[in-house]
Amino acid sequence: MLKVISIDPGKNKCGLIVADLGVKKVDKAIIVKTELLEDYVRTINNSEDITKIIIGNGTTSKEIREKLNFFKKEIITFEEKNTTFRAKERYFEFFPISGLKFLIPREVFLLNKNLDALSALIILEDYCKMKFTLNQDIDFKTWLK
């Protein structure tokens, strides 16, 4: 199993996913307060065999990379342009609208949704040049507080 962490960095919160490259599946997806990110990554790294971390090159990426310097394997900074916009489209691929809800504008379903974990997924998919599926029923707006 080749497990990787992908992070969409932010000033107050970060999207994070853990994915298995071998089976192209997302195991975990979460949004974590930026100040808790280092501890969360340490916990994951201690329980899983993480081979690399991919960090989007946007807001606070440099600071987050420095916080993760304990990770002695590969840390890659990768382009994250338009990932939040693209996360809105990807959301409906995972959670399609059905029934009469289809008549309501799609934007209504995205109100109050935190798509940072989906942005982290898109960063990983762009890096790997392949799409991933969900290993389980994952709620991409879950917060770790």
Image: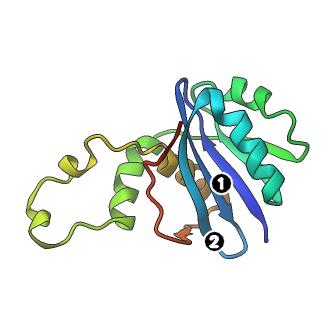
Q: Residue at x 52, y 71 (%)?
A: 136
| Structural distance between the alpha carbons of marks 1 and 2 | 13 Å
Q: Quadrant of residue 128?
A: bottom right
Spot occupied by residue 10 in the image (x, y as percentages of width and height): 55, 29
Q: Quadrant of the N terminus?
A: bottom right
Secondary structure type for disc 2: loop
Mark 1 or 2, nearer chain start: 2
User: Are the residues at dot 1 and dot 2 in contact (C-beta closer than 8 Å)?
Assistant: no
Q: Quadrant of residue 35?
A: top right
The amino acid type, in three-letter code, at marker 2 is Lys
Looking at this view, name the residue that lies furthest to the bottom. 23
Which of the two residues, 33 or 55, is positioned nearer the viewer here? 33
Secondary structure type for disc 1: helix
Looking at this view, name the residue that lies furthest to the front. 145
Left-right relation of 135 to 38: left
Which of the two residues, 143 or 140, is positioned nearer the viewer here? 143
The disc placed on residue 142 is none
How has the structure been colored for display?
rainbow
Spot occupied by residue 28 in the image (x, y as percentages of width and height): 59, 58
Left-right relation of 92 to 140: left
The amino acid type, in three-letter code, at marker 1 is Tyr
Q: Is residue 56 above or below residue 94?
A: above
Q: Residue at x 40, y 58 (%)?
A: 90
Residue named by callout 2: 24
Q: Residue at x 91, y 43 (%)?
A: 72
Residue named by callout 1: 127
Badge 2, how many Cα within 10 Å: few under 14, some, many 20+?
Answer: some
Badge 1, how many Cα within 10 Å: few under 14, some, many 20+?
Answer: some
